[in-house]
Image (tube, coloured by chain):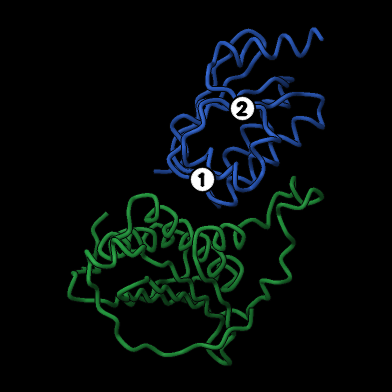
Chain colours: A green, B blue
Amino acid sequence: MPFPYPMTPESSVVEVTLESDLKNVEVAEEISRRVAGTAGFDEDDQRRIEMAVHESMINAIWHGNKNDSSKSVWLRFQIHRDRLEIRIRDQGNGFDPQCVPNPLAQENLLNVSGRGIFLIRSFMDEFRVESISGLGTEVTMVKRLNSGIQQKQGGTDREHESHNSTS
Amino acid sequence: MSMKATIRQVDSVSVIDISGRITLGEGCTELRELIRDQLSKGNKNILLNLADVTYIDSSGIGELVSAYTGVSKQGGTLRLLNLTKKVHDLLQITKLYTVFDVYDDEAKAISSFSKASSA
């Protein structure tokens, strides 16, 4: 698959808007792999970040945008000196992650669904959900680099907007 | 790469070799239909060989759970064979590793079905 969003060590932000189609989940995964590799994450963490992006994209397309291909999903990846911040926004009405049943509870263990948010929380260091009036729902995920990699990479740390968390 | 599956009959066991992605949409739907088809044919001993699964997401894990409970409800047995590290890790963190019977040796997995049925 060609990668249309070049990422160089000098650029710290990748922003893209994708049509709300499940086929674009793999596009988002590919972007996340490239960005996470550029940020200095090892293969295991790249895989974890990719899975978090995958689950967030599924939530955005399937649950947020109700699989409506006329809607879109906006993604923003920003490399900071010590972390990667990923924001994914759909055009849906949002959800409260606190209302998702604990999939590890004995009574939920054999549930068919309800593990997506749990996996994102497991793979990322921070996870926030914010409903933005008129825009949709935005998920922010942060993965921190370990100190050894930070020094090796010496990435940029641009200013970015602050976000309130509803979770 | 979307999901592909081939089915082999080994003794009384339907061995389903799965490759590719088990994710929301195509992969999950195909797996569901495969299991349904085996049950409709009366094949209630099912071994899922996941050696060549390249990717599985939360929906894919849910589909494995659905297959497991569906087969059990029909009086059958579903077991897993050759988990990749990715699948193994996901089953560990979701606490499902203890729910499934998991094997890394096909011959042992096949013989486990006959032991179960003769018990």
Q: Look at the numbered disc 1 and give the secondary structure of its residue.
A: strand
The C terminus of chain A is located in which quarter?
A: bottom right
Cα separation, mark 2 vs mark 1, equals: 16 Å
Q: Position of residue A91 (x, y in %)?
A: 54, 80
Looking at the picture, tell me which residue is in the foreground, B24 or A100.
A100
Describe the element under mark 2 as helix, strand or loop: strand
Q: Is residue A58 positioned above or below A161 on the image?
A: above
Q: What amino acid type is highlighted by mark number 2?
A: Val
Residue at 53% across, 38% down: B88
* Circle 1 crowding by C-alpha within 10 Å: few under 14, some 14–19, many from 20: many
Provide the residue designation for mark 2: B102
The residue closer to the viewer here, B33 or B99, is: B99
Near mark 2 (Cα within 10 A), the count class, few <14, some 14-19 or many ≥20, is: some
- In percent of width and height, residue A26 lies at 40, 57
Residue B52 location in percent, x, y?
43, 32
From the viewer's perspective, tell me whether residue B62 is left or right of residue A61.
Answer: right
Q: Sequence-wise, which precedes: disc 2 or disc 1?
A: 1
Q: Nearer the viewer, residue A90 or B7?
A: A90
